[in-house]
Amino acid sequence: MADLSFLQRFSLGWQSLLRSLSDADYAERLGSIDEAPPALAEPEAPKPAVAEPAPAPVPEVGPGPADGALQILNLLQREGRLVDFLQQEVSSFSDAQIGQAARVVHEGCRRTLKRYLEVEPVLEAAEGEPTIVKEGFDAEAIKLVGNVAGGAPFRGILKHRGWRAREIRLPETLGDHDFKILAPAEVEL
């Protein structure tokens, strides 16, 4: 498979984010994508059927697993109109119009990111510079692409520095807040 460009990876990431926000099954599968598949169990001898009462459903308490992602998307919408921008069909707009809109979205989303997340690069080197990946590297934080052969240390060119959230400062929400409402409809009276 050919290496994906940064824009292709960015687009794939956004598509995965948006789909995982609306599809809990997809989000669960995405969350376990790096896990090893479960080992196949030996077949057991059939046991006699015993009718057991089904366990009572446990009421959900507090925010669910996708709520943090929805909250961040809500904040990016509020400050940068990110969802509005991504939902807009832009093929009929000129590059100048798209660039002007992107500048406004970028400014608001960047401000939101700085306010609620402390983000740092995974690797400090500049993109395009030679890099050495030492033995025992974190495979979740560093992705080797291209002709990967042999063992560490690996020598290559840094294509993307990567990002990690060092600190998350999301505002507290009310217990009954509906995280699926990314932006309320506005009706002027």
Image (cartoon, rainbow, N blue to C red):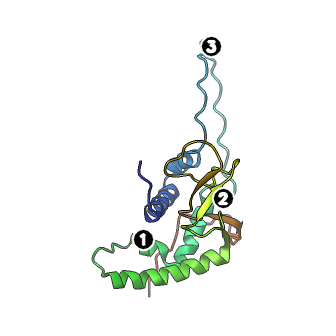
Q: What residue type is labelled 3?
A: Lys
Q: Are marks 3 and 2 in contact (CB under 8 Å)?
A: no
Q: Mark 1 points at which residue?
A: 86
Q: Name the residue under label 2.
A: 63
Is residue 5 in sight in this rendering?
A: yes
Q: Residues within 10 Å of mark 3 (few under 14, many from 20)?
A: few
Q: What element carries label 1?
A: helix
The residue closer to the viewer here, 128 or 177, is 128
Give the alpha-carbon distance from disc 2 to disc 1, as whole Å. 26 Å
Give the alpha-carbon distance from disc 1 to disc 3, as whole Å. 54 Å
Count up the numbered dots.
3
Q: How crowded is mark 2: few (under 14 residues within 10 Å), some or many (20 or more)?
A: some
| Residue drawn at point x = 48 percent, y = 74 percent | 82
| Residue drawn at point x = 66 percent, y = 38 percent | 56
Vertically, is 60 above or below 103? above
Q: Which amino acid does label 1 sit on?
A: Leu
| Residue drawn at point x = 69 percent, y = 48 percent | 135
- The percent coordinates of residue 109 (x first, y second) are 55, 77
The residue closer to the viewer here, 74 or 4, is 4
- The percent coordinates of residue 138 (x first, y second) are 67, 51
Q: Name the residue under label 3.
A: 47
